């Protein structure tokens, strides 16, 4: 066997824990149980690039055994060609925010009863299906590297989703609500989420289609948060900038939005995307991606910061023990100063869009798309008819100039973001936002 | 039974112990155990940046006791006792349902459908695949941004307390490449269970799409004939149509096809079926995730809706027969209703004979409304096509439609089909679809 090449750096990250899932579908408890996981990732930086081992059921053993793993990873690294360098970075471990009530102290029987109450609250003569899920994942993460850093933390994320499906004369519509948090158990007395899901599903039975095309749009805080995530967040990820697949590459210092617009990613914020340190052990901190309309900084890992510059490391994240990728965490548009009434008045005629069914971006092309759960036409500054199935699409480099007003009512909403086959918890947020020239995709015509 | 398979059964003798222990506590026990290894290599631009070896194993246990179904899973098979305990505890909370037993029939151990003994997870092989894709990409003036090659091999075991025992081996190969020219992007991929992909063609196609899409022109809003490539078609079908064929969704009230069994729901030239025994199919299998023998399922024949997809749980609950449509969600995931090789077929026509907008892929298909099928998505790598040739690229526009009604508005389907994951699809021409220009 050939001698493994020299090792410049290594780190080991292990994730152990358990997940509790409850699924109630039309009064039937389909499942309510717990599963267990234990997985580790060993990254070795050889003379050029990375060699990585992902190992199930890792147990720390003898020095000899660990050296053998290092040698295996190092041999993998021997096929790499890219000269990878790692920037220096600060190290600091934040405290995990305290939980109001630890979900692990509540029995699964109680959780099932509370979830059933939320599901039952979605009952309505037009609702043909009610479904509620509870998800609780507690992870213990340990990190160590060849520079002598050793950190660990434990975090528990929990929450629920409730879906109501309404049907009438062959028309089928849905309402969907969710509440997820790192701040502890939050399933008690939440029946209003079920009621609201049902209310939206039933109301959508009578909703029409908006006319597709360009118009002014008011985005609610949830949808405007997804807009920030899709339109700006992904394109600011350092790995995409490094590969040449972000339209923001080389745009540092360029004005791409109005001078009151600031967009931030902050993994230190105690929201759903919080992390005490990132997946490389690096300290997390606030990064202003867009400051006063100007491209200010990118999100980085140690590798992409060294390759690209402009920004800070501490934005490497991973799903479980998968390889770290540069990711968003808690992404938001900063508050402006426009009250909601002023935004509606300024819109005059257009569309108010609420909630999110997700979105997607092609950051190299600079084109993004995202979808609202529902909306209302705005006529003379007032909400009128409800509309359904509305998407927006836009172009990164021009769309931020079209943000005319930002409200003063920023709110964060939890969700999950997919990239490279990995899904990680995030939150997105914004105040209400008035967008000019929004391209609305909907099937209504004159 | 081969020697290799015999050796495997010896290695997993603890499964028999688990089944024996479990059978003392509950009516029935089912075990799914999988072990696998994958090697992948990624390139950033034209240089290989990392190589990964991933070793995975997972154990999923399902218990059934007086109609109460419990589940649990773990990465660590040595913890099977805790996992069994958790599954039994889970079952105590589940609502009881009609249950007529796990399958008893012996199914043959097999690796004939999805196993290539010459496909060995090896970093040099992954490196070679990347090199070949890069060579292909060099044929067009586009910059490679990223690429990946993965080779994998896995063994699945399914066993239950009714006597079912089966082992299957399968291999996999996945390659993909992304490219850009200016603000124009292109990507391509290929997946196979065999070492039979064409890496230079994948690289060439990614770079072609990036370079050919540059300099796109705007399009006015209006209704146009469109041609969805198998990729774009797969994205829309998977997001909004296929969930409506799941019997769980049908009986729960989450499918708008629920009351249309026997109805003509689409153009009579079209048929949809599941083909679990397709040669070299990516999702082929002789049995499903619960050990039920698979067979062809005709969902829609000549435009008429004939069947939905059932697993055992849903079939027993509603007095139907399982269609062997249970699939496993990952190494340690439970079962869910899905499909093997979902196939669209029908009378073939020349779909490129008249001027049409060709759409290679879409952005945002997952935001489609799964209840009513409405979608509004951005189109990617779209071109005006004439006489089968891609002409002027379209810079940016949205496609708005409904995944159910669009199948009543078809102009034809192509001769050629392509396997996109667990789907086998033609290109489909649709008449007078709504485009929102910019």
Image (tube, grey):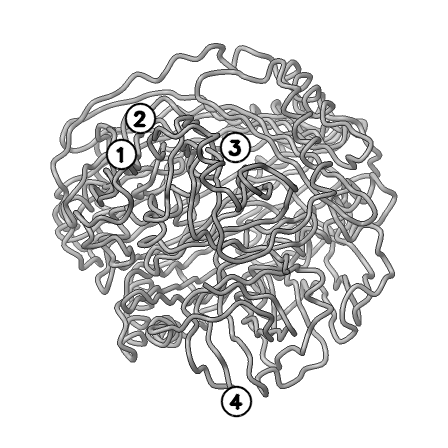
Per the image, the residue denoted by label 4 is: B387
The quarter in which the C terminus of chain A is drawn is bottom right
Examine the image and state in which quarter residue A306 appears: top left
| Left or right, B128 with reference to A375 | left
Check whether the beta carbons of the residues at disc 4 and disc 3 lie within 8 A of each other: no
On residue B74, the disc is: 3
Q: Can the viewer see residue B31?
A: yes
Are both tags, 2 and 1, on one chain?
yes
Most extreme residue toward the front, as rendered?
A380
Distance, label 4 to label 2, CA atoms, is: 60 Å
Disc 2 versus disc 3: nearer the observer: 2
Lower position in the chain sequence, tag 4 or tag 3: 3
Q: Residues within 10 Å of mark 1 (few under 14, many from 20)?
A: many
Secondary structure, mark 2, is strand
Camera-side residue of A193 and A395: A395
Subunit ID for the residue under disc 1: A
Per the image, the residue denoted by label 2 is: A142
Secondary structure, mark 3, is strand
The quarter in which the N terminus of chain A is drawn is bottom left
Lower position in the chain sequence, tag 2 or tag 1: 1
Distance, label 3 to label 1, CA atoms, is: 21 Å
Check whether the beta carbons of the residues at disc 2 and disc 1 lie within 8 A of each other: yes
Does A254 appear above or below A137?
A: below
On residue A12, the disc is: 1
Residue A294 at what x, y percent from top left?
Answer: 22, 44
Secondary structure, mark 1, is strand
């Amino acid at each position: 066997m050939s001698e493994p090449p020299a090792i410049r750096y290594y780190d080991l990250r292990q994730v152990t824990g358990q997940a509790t899932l409850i699924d109630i579908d039309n009064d039937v408890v389909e499942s309510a149980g717990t599963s267990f996981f234990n997985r580790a990732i060993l990254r070795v930086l050889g003379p050029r690039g990375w060699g990585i081992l992902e190992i199930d059921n890792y147990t720390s053993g003898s020095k000899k055994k660990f050296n053998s793993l290092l040698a295996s990873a190092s041999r993998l690294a021997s096929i790499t060609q890219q000269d990878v360098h790692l920037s220096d970075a600060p190290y600091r471990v934040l405290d995990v925010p305290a939980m109001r009530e630890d979900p692990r102290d509540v029995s699964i029987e109680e959780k099932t009863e509370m979830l059933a109450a939320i599901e039952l609250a979605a009952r309505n003569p037009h609702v043909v299906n009610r479904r509620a899920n509870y998800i609780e994942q507690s992870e213990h993460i340990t990190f160590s590297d060849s520079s002598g850093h050793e950190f660990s933390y434990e975090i528990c994320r929990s929450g629920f989703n409730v879906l109501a499906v309404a049907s009438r004369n062959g028309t089928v519509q849905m309402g969907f609500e969710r509440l997820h948090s790192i701040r502890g158990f939050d399933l008690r007395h939440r029946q209003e989420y079920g009621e609201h899901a049902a209310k939206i599903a039933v109301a959508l039975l009578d909703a029409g289609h908006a006319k597709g095309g360009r118009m002014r749009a008011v985005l609610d805080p949830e949808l405007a948060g997804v807009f920030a995530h899709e339109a700006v967040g992904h394109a600011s990820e350092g790995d995409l900038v490094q590969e040449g697949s972000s339209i923001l590459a080389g745009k540092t210092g360029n004005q791409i939005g109005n001078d009151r617009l600031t967009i931030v990613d902050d993994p230190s914020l105690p929201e759903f995307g919080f992390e005490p340190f990132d997946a490389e052990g690096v300290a997390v901190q606030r990064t202003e991606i867009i400051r006063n309309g100007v491209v200010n900084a990118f999100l980085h890992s140690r590798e992409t910061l060294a390759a690209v510059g402009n920004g800070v490391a501490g934005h490497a994240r991973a799903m479980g023990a998968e390889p770290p990728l540069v990711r968003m965490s808690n992404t938001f548009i900063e508050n402006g100063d426009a009250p909601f009434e002023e935004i509606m008045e300024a819109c005059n005629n257009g569309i108010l869009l609420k909630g999110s069914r997700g979105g997607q971006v092609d950051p190299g092309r600079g084109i993004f798309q995202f979808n609202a759960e529902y909306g209302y036409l705005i006529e003379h500054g007032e909400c009128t008819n409800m509309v359904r199935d509305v998407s927006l699409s836009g172009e990164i480099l021009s769309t931020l100039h079209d943000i005319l007003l930002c409200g003063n009512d920023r709110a964060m909403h939890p969700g999950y973001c997919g990239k490279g086959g990995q899904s990680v918890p995030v939150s997105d947020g914004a105040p209400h936002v008035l967008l000019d020239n929004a391209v609305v995709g909907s099937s209504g015509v004159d | 039974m081969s020697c290799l398979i015999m050796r495997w059964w010896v290695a997993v003798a603890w499964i028999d112990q688990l089944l024996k222990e479990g059978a003392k506590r509950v009516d029935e026990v089912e075990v799914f155990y999988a072990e696998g290894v994958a090697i992948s290599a990624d390139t950033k631009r034209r240089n290989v940046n990392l190589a990964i070896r991933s070793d995975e194993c997972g154990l999923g246990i399902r218990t059934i006791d007086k109609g109460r179904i419990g589940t649990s899973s773990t990465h660590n098979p040595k913890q099977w006792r805790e996992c069994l305990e958790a599954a039994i505890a889970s079952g105590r909370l589940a609502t009881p349902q009609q249950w007529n037993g796990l399958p008893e029939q012996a199914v043959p151990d097999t690796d004939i459908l999805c196993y290539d003994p010459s496909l060995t997870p090896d970093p040099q092989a992954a490196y070679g695949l990347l090199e070949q894709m890069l060579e292909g990409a060099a044929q067009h003036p586009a910059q490679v941004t990223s690429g990946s090659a993965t080779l994998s091999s896995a063994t699945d075991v399914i066993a239950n307390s009714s006597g079912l025992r089966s082992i299957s081996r399968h291999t996999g190969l996945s390659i993909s490449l992304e490219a850009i020219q200016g603000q124009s992007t292109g990507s391509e991929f290929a997946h196979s269970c065999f070492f039979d992909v064409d890496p230079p063609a994948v690289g060439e196609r990614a770079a072609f799409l990036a370079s050919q899409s540059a300099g796109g022109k705007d399009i006015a809003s209006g209704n146009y004939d469109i041609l969805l490539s198998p990729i774009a078609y797969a994205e829309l079908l998977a997001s909004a149509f296929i969930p409506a064929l799941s019997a769980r969704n049908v009986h729960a009230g989450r499918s708008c096809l629920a009351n249309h069994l026997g109805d003509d729901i689409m153009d009579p030239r079209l048929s949809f079926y599941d083909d679990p025994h397709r040669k070299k199919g990516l999702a082929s299998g002789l049995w499903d995730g619960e050990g039920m023998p698979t067979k062809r399922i005709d969902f829609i024949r000549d435009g008429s809706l004939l069947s939905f997809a059932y697993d055992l749980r849903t079939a027993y609950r509603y007095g139907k027969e399982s269609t062997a449509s249970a699939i496993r969600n990952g190494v340690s995931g439970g079962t869910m209703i899905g499909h093997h090789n979902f196939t669209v077929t029908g009378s073939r026509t020349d779909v490129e004979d008249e001027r049409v907008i060709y759409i290679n892929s879409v952005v945002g298909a997952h935001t489609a409304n799964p209840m009513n099928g409405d979608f509004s998505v951005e189109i990617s790598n779209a071109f005006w096509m004439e006489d089968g040739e891609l002409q002027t690229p379209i810079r940016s526009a949205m496609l708005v439609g409904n995944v159910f009604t669009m199948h009543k508005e078809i102009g034809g389907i192509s001769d050629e089909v392509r396997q996109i994951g667990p789907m086998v699809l033609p290109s489909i021409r649709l008449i007078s679809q709504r485009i929102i220009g910019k």
